[in-house]
Image: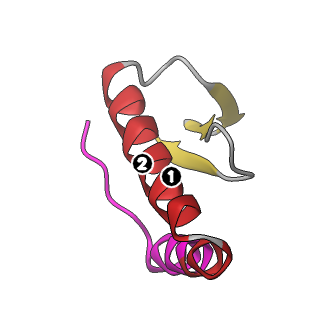
Amino acid sequence: MRLSYTAEALLEMSEAASYYRSCRKELARAFKQRIEVAEEEVMLHPNAWRSLGASYRRKLLKQFPYGLVYHQP
C-alpha cells in the first residue's frame, strides 16, 4: 500500500497545523505526530478501520477532530 494525498487534503492539513500553531506550537507538533502515527497504523493494518463503502476507510486521529480517509483498491 502506498500513501498519497489529494491537494485538498494537503491544504486542510496545512491549515489545521497553522491553526494549532497559532494556539500553541506544541499543538501543531502533536497534530503532525498524530498524522504520522495514523499513517504508520494504516500502512500496517489497512483493514482495521471503519469502512466508508466503495473501498474507502477512515482512521480517526487521536486527540484531534480529523481523520485519514484512504482508498483500498
Quadrant showing the N terminus: top left
Q: What element carries label 1?
A: helix
Judged left or right of residue 46, residue 11 is right
Secondary structure mostly seen in the magenta stretch? helix
**Percent from the top left, x then y, of residue 22?**
63, 82
- Disc 2 to disc 1: CB gap under 8 Å: yes
Residue sitting nearer the eye, 11 or 1: 11
Q: Does the magenta stretch include residue 38?
A: no
Residue bearing mark 2:
33
Badge 2 local density, few (<14 within 10 Å), some, or many (20+)? few
Which scheme is used to colour this image of the protein?
secondary structure
Q: Residue flagged by tag 1: what amino acid is it?
A: Ala
The residues colored magenta run: 1-17
Q: What element carries label 2?
A: helix
Relative height, residue 67 to residue 43 (above, below) = below
Badge 1 local density, few (<14 within 10 Å), some, or many (20+)? some
Residue bearing mark 1:
30
Quadrant showing the C terminus: top left
**Percent from the top left, x then y, of residue 34?**
49, 44
Q: Residue flagged by tag 2: what amino acid is it?
A: Gln
Q: In which quarter of the image is residue 5?
A: bottom left
Image point 32% across, 59% down: which residue?
A: 4
Image point 60% across, 24% down: which residue?
A: 49
Distance from disc 2 to disc 1, alpha carbons, whole Å, reads 5 Å
